[in-house]
Image: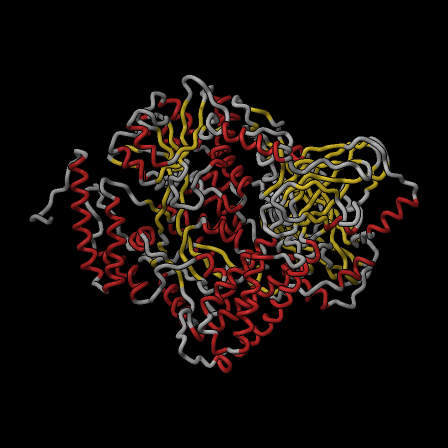
Amino acid sequence: MGAKMRKAGKQRAVGKRAVRTARRGLAAVLTAALVLTAWCGENLQAEAASDTKTAADLQADLLDVIQDTGSYEEYLEAHAQAAYPETEVTVKGTDYLEASEGFYAEEGGLCTLEEGSVTYEVEVPQAGFYSIRLKYYPIEGKNSSIERELYINGEVPFENAQYLKFSRIWINAEEIVRDSRDNDVRPKQAEAGQWMETFLKDSDGYYQDAFDFYFEKGKNTITLSSTKEPMKIGSITLTQEEALPEYAGYQAEHQGAGHQAVSCETVVVQGETALYKSDSTLYPITDRSSPLTEPYSPSKTRLNVVGGANWKQVGQWISWEVDVPSDGMYEIAMRYRQNINTGVTVVRSLSIDGQVPFAEARECKFYYGSDWEVAALGTEEAPYEFYLTAGKHMLRLEIGLGDEMAEIIRRTDDCISELNRAYRQLLIVIGSSPDTFRDYQLESKTPEALEILAQQYDNIVEIKRLVDEYSKGSSGSQSASIDNLVNQLKRMVEEPDTIAKQWGAFKDNIVSLGSWQLTMKEQPLEIDYLMVGAPGMKLPKAEAGFLAKASHEVKQFFASFVEDYDSIGEVYEGEALNVWLLADGATVTSASGSGRDQATVIKDLVDNYFVPRTNIPVNVKLVNSGVLLSATLAGEGPDVALNVAGVEPVNYALRNAVTDLTQFEDFEEVRKWFHEDAMTQFTFDGGVYALPQTMSFHVLFYRADILKELGLDIPRTWDDFYEALAVIQKNNMNIGITPDYTTFAMYLYQHGGTYYTEDGMSSGLDTENAVEAFKRWTSNYVNYRMPVTYDFANRFRNGEMPLAIGDYTNYSYLSVFAPEIRGLWGFTVVPGYEKEDGTTDHSVSTWESASVIMATSDQKEEAWEFLKWWMSADTQSDYGNEIENVLGVSGRVATANLEALANLPWSNRDFKQLMAQLEWVKAIPQIPGSYYTERNIRNAFYTVYNNNEDPRETLQDIVKTINTEIDSKREEFGLPVRQTAGGED
């Protein structure tokens, strides 16, 4: 009952927010599978009409799933007089009332798929609040956390119940070994399937206790709706979470039982030897900053710590196994460092053998510092003592926010939401660029917005007080955004006529507050080792002395002259296949750049799978993309180059620098792995000079909550789009479409135009279709005043841009860096033009990165075997999952292999939309002189936009210039030149 009393006093949570509540059916999985099959075959266009209907159907209910749901705090208040019965009710996973098609029972529970729902009926003997304990088994899926929505009696009880997360269990699949250069090789991470039990809790960490759910007496239903990943449900139990004793009571209990302090040798457990972890990203990492880090090397890679920036999200946990010699009271200490989030105190919850021993152990604090620290868990006055029996025990540290930080973040979350609401209301009146000398009469036109500002001024003042108290007055630059908002809101509330003058700063300060909140929620911590020993044990030094540090620095300096930091992993001597990963090539999509993390993953996959299977040794090197062509022409290039910019293969082919892949007899089979248009960019004069590595394209991003406020649907056609644009602009918001080569291609293709003629000898922009596309494209900015440049992420976050067409990989960025709008946004197919047959053309262009075989290679057959392996579904799936393991969702790979794309951990709703748009993807061909087309399209746009020139005449002018350059390039490379009529040029 003590825990329940504490719950009743929880601080106020975030206000109402529009969130998703609708269930999703198994039919979507089948639809996606059918579409994917169509892409992989040769009948894509024949299926276009039926697939278009599917795309429209998929769009139809995207806004219907948004509804108002109260906050958890409001839910508790609504049932404030409810009891907390001590009875317990359990229902087996297989005893369900109804379940979606495809769910199946097997020994131990009900297997639920990544889409669908299951409903259980429970007989509750007494009305009141119950916590829900779930026994589950993670079924193999796409390696991400399991997510479910909860309904009680057909309704989502409060908004947090829509975002329930359940972790998997990961282990190091192998021991840490060293390669031929004496560097540690990061062990692969593997899932260790185990039954787990957990209470349903807040995935954001705003509440430490399990959620309380109100049930009426008698029959009630509990529904779990799948949103991500499959799992087996063993049982669902309605019960009360046991209240934790205070440390004083815990200590008194063990003293009363006669448990004495032990006197034994200290047991040391290296952090990198963690037995279990919640995420595959929690692999061992390297620290070479201190000679006291164990194990140590000044120049070689030693995987000697765990955690760091990978261990920062609420709910992540790491477990270590420790074997103690005798029963008794122990201290637990560790060598740790938190030097990532300046001024932030991070929190870990300690559990021993699955149980938190006392309340204070739920908030073990680790303070910011630039150096390593060694300290025992406890207070500033004294370390905690823990009772352990002789033998093996599991120590687990899980990230939490702690009560103080949780209240700060809750308040900040509410403040950001309300300030954005006030911002949008004021925006309707004063616009995005207000006249600072005009009196907008805001007191009479937007009284609600001014009231919100006044309320949030009080809120931000309280947040500042809490932050200062939390940081003990040393918050420094971390709280600058709060200080700025305090001062600004005070002036805006006292002098509303100054709001127009402060408008730009107001928007920036809201964005800064959101960034500050995101930073404060992150809880990074590195651990070198843990120590379990007798109370009062002598702790080792955290940092080396002056001479040891100086020696360390000198060794590192001299090692930099002899260590090869370009080569990755194992280096084979002799006739090895040389593969270069270009460090900055193909940056046309946010998911196709490369770096040492990517190179390390590739090398691990090569050594573990490709080399043993083929007996072809491969050396992987990370290289700047600018040296590829010059090195190849000088005879020093690689056999294979990865991550080549998509515009380069044909450019290299014209110089005989890359290999035509059609010479390999199984090329046509390999071609089927990709979208039917994926090879277009790499094809010239009958040859294909690369395999697509990544493939990206435009989608329509939307803010569902704002569209509903405005009474708008998601636009399916351009007529719908311009109708929505009128309403959005009337409310002083706007829509974003970046005016570049790729968005013009979207209009061009939807108008039936092409960039080049079929023979590739001249521009195709002299057709009426191209002129109409150019007129419509430029009119967006000339006539409709859509912005030419804009910060998509921030304008989308604050609601100023509720619709935008952009690269689908922006999804990854928004998922990580805009948590305050979770559940309020999504993406779908771009608008299209209705055709005479009643279908709608949603065509978009694609941009790619490539993998090529250099013409100078004397191992072309081996290189082809490597390319086939590299771009196969299995390898690309492994690579995509490994990169996401390393970098998180923000590193999701835009793989061009269709089967591998389906294997990445997309949610069901998002994957269906991605598949619907991919159907309409068309590539932009590359020909000699094609770079001139992009350049002149940009020039033509700004000629029309800046000088208000006629679009038709402007386009005709650049066509002549483009054709002249194409002729010149074709002559340069000895290719046939078009026949001109009447001296066109």
Single out the residue that lies furthest toward the left: 982
- Residue at 85% of width from left, 51% of height from top? 248
Whether residue 728 sits left or right of residue 194 in the image: it is left
Above or below, 126 against 40 in this view is: below
Q: How is the image coloured?
A: secondary structure
Taking the image as shown, residue 318 lies to the left or right of residue 944, namely: right
Q: Look at the image and tell me whether residue 246 can be seen.
A: yes
| Left-right relation of 218 to 374 | right
Toward which corner of the image does residue 538 lie, by quadrant? Answer: top right
Q: Residue furthest top?
A: 574
Q: How many marks?
A: 0
Quarter of the image where one finds residue 398: top right
Q: Which is more toward the observer, 976 or 919?
A: 976
x and y percentages locating residue 255 in the rendered image: 90, 44
Q: Where residue 113 sits: x, y (%)?
A: 60, 45
Q: Is residue 882 above or below residue 770?
A: above
Of 161 and 950, which appears nearest the observer?
Answer: 950
Which of the image's four quarters has the N terminus? bottom right
Q: Position of residue 735 (x, y in %)?
A: 40, 63
In percent of the image, x 51 and y 81: which residue is there? Answer: 443
Residue 478 screen position, x and y as percent: 57, 56
Task: Decide if residue 91 is in sight here.
Answer: no
Q: Residue at x 50, y 69 (%)?
A: 423
Above or below, 458 against 739 in this view is below
